Image (cartoon, rainbow, N blue to C red):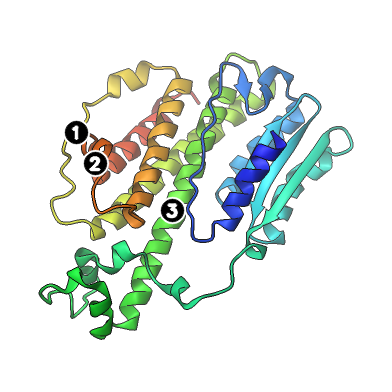
Amino acid sequence: MKWCLLFVLAILAAGNGIDVPAQSEFIGPGGIRGALLKDVAAPLLQAWLRFHEKEYCLEVDSIFVFQTKGIEIWCLAKDDGDHQKLASLVEPLRNSHRIDIYTTYSDRMKKPYAPEDDDPPPSLWTNAELRTYYRDPFAGRSGIFENPPGYESAGADPALKRNLKLFSDQIVEWKKKMERLAADLPALAEAGYGPVPLANLRSLSRSVCRAHARELAKYASRLQENLSHALPRGSGAGRNPRPARESSRKSADPRELARKLSSEALDLGRRITAFLYPQAHTVPLGDLRESSLMDALKALESAAAEFERNVPK
Protein backbone atom coordinates (compact mmCIF):
# COMPACT_ATOMS: atom_id res chain seq x y z
CA MET A 1 0.00 0.00 0.00
CA LYS A 2 2.73 2.47 0.96
CA TRP A 3 4.75 1.95 -2.20
CA CYS A 4 1.63 2.21 -4.38
CA LEU A 5 0.57 5.50 -2.83
CA LEU A 6 4.12 6.83 -2.87
CA PHE A 7 4.35 6.06 -6.57
CA VAL A 8 1.11 7.97 -7.22
CA LEU A 9 2.36 10.99 -5.29
CA ALA A 10 5.68 10.90 -7.11
CA ILE A 11 3.90 11.00 -10.46
CA LEU A 12 1.69 13.88 -9.30
CA ALA A 13 4.67 15.85 -8.05
CA ALA A 14 6.86 15.21 -11.05
CA GLY A 15 4.04 15.79 -13.47
CA ASN A 16 4.56 19.51 -13.84
CA GLY A 17 3.33 19.19 -17.40
CA ILE A 18 1.30 16.03 -16.84
CA ASP A 19 -2.25 16.21 -15.57
CA VAL A 20 -2.99 13.14 -13.44
CA PRO A 21 -6.67 13.09 -12.47
CA ALA A 22 -7.92 12.24 -9.01
CA GLN A 23 -9.01 8.67 -8.48
CA SER A 24 -12.14 7.49 -6.71
CA GLU A 25 -11.64 4.30 -4.75
CA PHE A 26 -14.62 1.96 -4.49
CA ILE A 27 -16.08 2.18 -0.98
CA GLY A 28 -18.03 -0.90 0.07
CA PRO A 29 -20.86 -0.95 2.62
CA GLY A 30 -19.59 0.24 5.97
CA GLY A 31 -16.13 0.93 4.60
CA ILE A 32 -13.71 3.79 4.16
CA ARG A 33 -10.27 3.87 2.55
CA GLY A 34 -8.09 1.35 4.38
CA ALA A 35 -10.54 0.11 7.02
CA LEU A 36 -14.13 -0.42 8.08
CA LEU A 37 -15.84 2.61 9.56
CA LYS A 38 -16.73 0.71 12.72
CA ASP A 39 -13.01 0.12 13.34
CA VAL A 40 -11.93 3.76 12.91
CA ALA A 41 -11.51 5.81 16.08
CA ALA A 42 -13.94 8.72 16.26
CA PRO A 43 -11.23 11.41 16.73
CA LEU A 44 -9.49 10.25 13.53
CA LEU A 45 -12.72 10.28 11.58
CA GLN A 46 -13.54 13.72 12.94
CA ALA A 47 -10.15 15.09 11.84
CA TRP A 48 -10.79 13.75 8.33
CA LEU A 49 -14.24 15.34 8.26
CA ARG A 50 -12.84 18.68 9.49
CA PHE A 51 -10.25 18.52 6.70
CA HIS A 52 -13.14 18.46 4.24
CA GLU A 53 -15.37 20.85 6.17
CA LYS A 54 -12.65 23.53 6.09
CA GLU A 55 -12.19 22.80 2.37
CA TYR A 56 -8.50 22.06 2.84
CA CYS A 57 -9.15 19.24 0.38
CA LEU A 58 -9.39 21.84 -2.40
CA GLU A 59 -5.95 23.24 -1.57
CA VAL A 60 -3.97 20.24 -0.33
CA ASP A 61 -3.94 17.08 -2.44
CA SER A 62 -4.07 14.34 0.22
CA ILE A 63 -4.95 10.69 0.62
CA PHE A 64 -6.14 9.46 4.03
CA VAL A 65 -5.60 5.76 4.74
CA PHE A 66 -7.31 4.64 7.94
CA GLN A 67 -6.09 1.88 10.22
CA THR A 68 -7.48 0.45 13.42
CA LYS A 69 -4.86 2.20 15.56
CA GLY A 70 -4.05 5.26 13.51
CA ILE A 71 -3.93 6.89 10.13
CA GLU A 72 -1.54 7.45 7.24
CA ILE A 73 -1.80 10.68 5.27
CA TRP A 74 -0.07 11.07 1.93
CA CYS A 75 0.13 14.73 1.00
CA LEU A 76 1.25 16.64 -2.07
CA ALA A 77 1.82 20.16 -0.72
CA LYS A 78 2.78 23.34 -2.52
CA ASP A 79 4.62 24.69 0.52
CA ASP A 80 4.96 24.44 4.31
CA GLY A 81 1.69 26.31 4.72
CA ASP A 82 -0.21 23.43 3.11
CA HIS A 83 1.55 20.96 5.38
CA GLN A 84 0.69 23.00 8.47
CA LYS A 85 -3.00 23.10 7.58
CA LEU A 86 -3.06 19.35 7.54
CA ALA A 87 -0.84 18.87 10.59
CA SER A 88 -2.94 21.24 12.69
CA LEU A 89 -5.87 18.84 12.46
CA VAL A 90 -4.05 15.67 13.47
CA GLU A 91 -1.12 16.73 15.68
CA PRO A 92 -3.32 16.90 18.82
CA LEU A 93 -4.14 13.21 18.30
CA ARG A 94 -0.55 11.93 18.34
CA ASN A 95 -0.59 11.11 22.05
CA SER A 96 -3.39 8.59 21.62
CA HIS A 97 -3.12 7.47 17.98
CA ARG A 98 -0.45 6.69 15.46
CA ILE A 99 -0.26 9.52 12.94
CA ASP A 100 2.02 9.17 9.91
CA ILE A 101 2.18 12.07 7.43
CA TYR A 102 4.17 11.62 4.23
CA THR A 103 4.60 14.96 2.48
CA THR A 104 5.94 15.65 -0.99
CA TYR A 105 6.49 19.31 -1.90
CA SER A 106 5.52 20.00 -5.49
CA ASP A 107 7.52 23.24 -5.68
CA ARG A 108 10.71 21.29 -4.93
CA MET A 109 10.01 18.82 -7.73
CA LYS A 110 9.48 21.32 -10.53
CA LYS A 111 11.62 21.14 -13.60
CA PRO A 112 13.79 24.19 -14.44
CA TYR A 113 11.89 27.05 -16.01
CA ALA A 114 11.70 27.10 -19.79
CA PRO A 115 10.15 29.80 -22.01
CA GLU A 116 7.60 27.34 -23.36
CA ASP A 117 6.15 27.04 -19.84
CA ASP A 118 4.36 30.32 -20.54
CA ASP A 119 2.72 28.98 -23.69
CA PRO A 120 -0.96 27.98 -23.70
CA PRO A 121 -1.85 24.44 -24.80
CA PRO A 122 -1.64 24.11 -28.61
CA SER A 123 -5.33 23.22 -28.72
CA LEU A 124 -6.14 26.71 -27.40
CA TRP A 125 -3.44 28.49 -29.38
CA THR A 126 -5.22 27.48 -32.59
CA ASN A 127 -8.77 27.82 -31.24
CA ALA A 128 -10.67 30.24 -33.48
CA GLU A 129 -13.50 30.75 -30.98
CA LEU A 130 -11.16 31.80 -28.19
CA ARG A 131 -9.16 34.09 -30.47
CA THR A 132 -12.38 35.78 -31.49
CA TYR A 133 -13.49 35.99 -27.87
CA TYR A 134 -10.26 37.76 -26.97
CA ARG A 135 -10.59 39.90 -30.10
CA ASP A 136 -7.48 38.72 -31.87
CA PRO A 137 -7.08 40.82 -35.05
CA PHE A 138 -5.65 37.82 -36.94
CA ALA A 139 -8.50 35.42 -36.13
CA GLY A 140 -10.25 35.92 -39.42
CA ARG A 141 -7.18 35.47 -41.63
CA SER A 142 -7.83 32.71 -44.14
CA GLY A 143 -5.92 29.49 -43.60
CA ILE A 144 -4.21 30.79 -40.48
CA PHE A 145 -5.06 27.78 -38.32
CA GLU A 146 -3.58 25.22 -40.68
CA ASN A 147 -0.12 26.56 -39.88
CA PRO A 148 0.28 27.49 -36.18
CA PRO A 149 4.02 28.39 -36.46
CA GLY A 150 3.17 30.72 -39.33
CA TYR A 151 0.49 32.27 -37.22
CA GLU A 152 2.98 33.01 -34.43
CA SER A 153 5.34 34.67 -36.87
CA ALA A 154 2.46 36.80 -38.14
CA GLY A 155 2.82 38.93 -35.02
CA ALA A 156 0.38 37.43 -32.53
CA ASP A 157 -0.24 39.77 -29.62
CA PRO A 158 1.67 38.83 -26.42
CA ALA A 159 -1.45 39.84 -24.49
CA LEU A 160 -3.42 37.21 -26.41
CA LYS A 161 -0.85 34.58 -25.50
CA ARG A 162 -1.07 35.60 -21.85
CA ASN A 163 -4.88 35.54 -21.88
CA LEU A 164 -4.97 32.06 -23.42
CA LYS A 165 -2.50 30.81 -20.80
CA LEU A 166 -4.56 32.30 -17.98
CA PHE A 167 -7.66 30.75 -19.52
CA SER A 168 -6.10 27.27 -19.63
CA ASP A 169 -4.65 27.58 -16.11
CA GLN A 170 -8.09 28.52 -14.76
CA ILE A 171 -9.73 25.58 -16.51
CA VAL A 172 -7.12 23.16 -15.15
CA GLU A 173 -7.46 24.54 -11.61
CA TRP A 174 -11.26 24.25 -11.58
CA LYS A 175 -11.10 20.80 -13.16
CA LYS A 176 -8.72 19.54 -10.47
CA LYS A 177 -10.95 20.90 -7.72
CA MET A 178 -13.98 19.25 -9.31
CA GLU A 179 -12.06 15.96 -9.43
CA ARG A 180 -10.97 16.21 -5.78
CA LEU A 181 -14.52 16.88 -4.66
CA ALA A 182 -15.76 13.97 -6.73
CA ALA A 183 -13.09 11.54 -5.55
CA ASP A 184 -14.00 12.03 -1.88
CA LEU A 185 -17.78 12.09 -2.29
CA PRO A 186 -18.41 8.29 -2.04
CA ALA A 187 -16.49 7.97 1.25
CA LEU A 188 -18.29 11.00 2.71
CA ALA A 189 -21.65 9.53 1.67
CA GLU A 190 -20.71 6.22 3.27
CA ALA A 191 -19.94 8.02 6.53
CA GLY A 192 -23.10 10.11 6.35
CA TYR A 193 -25.64 7.61 5.05
CA GLY A 194 -24.10 4.18 5.58
CA PRO A 195 -25.18 1.47 8.04
CA VAL A 196 -22.49 2.18 10.66
CA PRO A 197 -23.80 4.37 13.52
CA LEU A 198 -21.37 7.24 14.04
CA ALA A 199 -23.02 8.85 17.06
CA ASN A 200 -22.21 12.58 17.11
CA LEU A 201 -20.40 12.49 13.74
CA ARG A 202 -23.41 11.54 11.61
CA SER A 203 -24.68 15.10 11.31
CA LEU A 204 -21.20 16.46 10.49
CA SER A 205 -20.68 13.71 7.88
CA ARG A 206 -23.94 14.56 6.12
CA SER A 207 -23.25 18.29 6.24
CA VAL A 208 -19.80 17.85 4.67
CA CYS A 209 -21.14 15.44 2.05
CA ARG A 210 -23.87 17.88 1.00
CA ALA A 211 -21.39 20.76 0.93
CA HIS A 212 -19.13 18.74 -1.38
CA ALA A 213 -22.06 18.13 -3.74
CA ARG A 214 -22.88 21.84 -3.68
CA GLU A 215 -19.27 22.76 -4.52
CA LEU A 216 -19.20 20.09 -7.23
CA ALA A 217 -22.21 21.75 -8.87
CA LYS A 218 -20.49 25.14 -8.62
CA TYR A 219 -17.31 24.01 -10.37
CA ALA A 220 -19.27 22.17 -13.05
CA SER A 221 -21.12 25.44 -13.74
CA ARG A 222 -17.89 27.45 -13.85
CA LEU A 223 -16.29 25.01 -16.25
CA GLN A 224 -19.35 25.01 -18.46
CA GLU A 225 -19.39 28.80 -18.65
CA ASN A 226 -15.68 29.14 -19.42
CA LEU A 227 -15.43 26.27 -21.88
CA SER A 228 -18.39 27.64 -23.81
CA HIS A 229 -16.06 30.37 -25.09
CA ALA A 230 -13.78 27.72 -26.63
CA LEU A 231 -16.44 25.72 -28.46
CA PRO A 232 -18.22 26.59 -31.70
CA ARG A 233 -21.65 28.13 -31.34
CA GLY A 234 -24.33 25.49 -31.28
CA SER A 235 -22.01 22.82 -29.85
CA GLY A 236 -23.97 22.92 -26.60
CA ALA A 237 -26.76 20.94 -28.24
CA GLY A 238 -26.22 17.36 -27.17
CA ARG A 239 -25.76 14.59 -29.67
CA ASN A 240 -27.48 12.10 -27.45
CA PRO A 241 -28.97 13.82 -24.41
CA ARG A 242 -29.71 11.51 -21.50
CA PRO A 243 -33.26 11.21 -20.21
CA ALA A 244 -34.20 12.94 -16.97
CA ARG A 245 -33.53 10.88 -13.87
CA GLU A 246 -35.09 13.07 -11.22
CA SER A 247 -37.48 10.49 -9.78
CA SER A 248 -34.86 7.73 -9.65
CA ARG A 249 -32.34 10.06 -8.02
CA LYS A 250 -34.80 11.06 -5.32
CA SER A 251 -35.54 7.46 -4.38
CA ALA A 252 -32.03 6.04 -4.69
CA ASP A 253 -29.58 5.35 -1.88
CA PRO A 254 -27.47 8.50 -1.32
CA ARG A 255 -24.33 6.34 -1.36
CA GLU A 256 -25.17 5.02 -4.82
CA LEU A 257 -25.96 8.51 -6.05
CA ALA A 258 -22.62 9.74 -4.68
CA ARG A 259 -20.77 6.98 -6.52
CA LYS A 260 -22.53 7.90 -9.78
CA LEU A 261 -21.78 11.60 -9.34
CA SER A 262 -18.16 10.80 -8.60
CA SER A 263 -17.82 8.60 -11.67
CA GLU A 264 -19.47 11.16 -13.96
CA ALA A 265 -17.35 14.04 -12.66
CA LEU A 266 -14.07 12.13 -12.97
CA ASP A 267 -14.99 11.07 -16.51
CA LEU A 268 -15.70 14.71 -17.37
CA GLY A 269 -12.30 15.63 -15.96
CA ARG A 270 -10.77 13.14 -18.39
CA ARG A 271 -12.69 14.66 -21.30
CA ILE A 272 -11.61 18.19 -20.38
CA THR A 273 -7.98 17.07 -20.21
CA ALA A 274 -8.36 15.47 -23.64
CA PHE A 275 -9.82 18.73 -24.97
CA LEU A 276 -6.88 20.78 -23.68
CA TYR A 277 -4.19 18.22 -24.51
CA PRO A 278 -5.49 16.01 -27.32
CA GLN A 279 -3.44 12.93 -28.09
CA ALA A 280 -4.81 12.72 -31.62
CA HIS A 281 -6.70 14.84 -34.14
CA THR A 282 -9.72 12.56 -34.02
CA VAL A 283 -12.45 12.20 -31.40
CA PRO A 284 -12.52 8.87 -29.49
CA LEU A 285 -15.42 6.66 -30.55
CA GLY A 286 -16.65 6.46 -26.96
CA ASP A 287 -16.96 10.25 -26.77
CA LEU A 288 -19.11 10.27 -29.91
CA ARG A 289 -21.64 8.09 -28.09
CA GLU A 290 -21.76 10.48 -25.13
CA SER A 291 -23.59 13.76 -24.75
CA SER A 292 -21.65 16.90 -25.63
CA LEU A 293 -19.18 18.27 -23.10
CA MET A 294 -21.46 21.24 -22.40
CA ASP A 295 -24.52 19.03 -21.91
CA ALA A 296 -22.57 16.67 -19.67
CA LEU A 297 -21.32 19.51 -17.45
CA LYS A 298 -24.83 20.93 -17.26
CA ALA A 299 -26.22 17.51 -16.32
CA LEU A 300 -23.55 17.10 -13.64
CA GLU A 301 -24.34 20.52 -12.19
CA SER A 302 -28.03 19.67 -12.08
CA ALA A 303 -27.49 16.21 -10.56
CA ALA A 304 -25.09 17.47 -7.89
CA ALA A 305 -27.45 20.32 -6.93
CA GLU A 306 -30.35 17.87 -6.78
CA PHE A 307 -28.32 15.53 -4.58
CA GLU A 308 -27.55 18.38 -2.17
CA ARG A 309 -31.24 19.35 -2.01
CA ASN A 310 -32.78 15.92 -1.60
CA VAL A 311 -30.54 13.82 0.63
CA PRO A 312 -31.33 13.87 4.37
CA LYS A 313 -29.64 16.58 6.40
Type of amino acid at the residue the image marks with label 2: Asp
Nearer-N-terminus badge (2/1): 1
Near-viewer residue (113 or 45): 113
Which residue matches tag 3?
Answer: 174
Question: In x, y percent, where is residue 213?
Answer: 45, 36
Nearer-N-terminus badge (3/2): 3
Which residue matches tag 1?
Answer: 241
Which residue matches tag 2?
Answer: 295
Near-viewer residue (230 or 12): 12
Q: What residue is shown at x 83% (from left), y 35% (from top)?
A: 98
Q: What residue is shown at x 12% (from left), y 77% (from top)?
A: 141
Can you name the residue that lies furthest to the right here? 95
Question: In x, y percent, where is residue 26?
Answer: 53, 25
What element does badge 1 sit on?
A: loop
Near-viewer residue (205 or 133): 133
Taking the image as shown, residue 231 lies to the left or right of residue 170, namely left
Residue 285 sits in quarter: top left
What element does badge 2 sit on?
A: helix
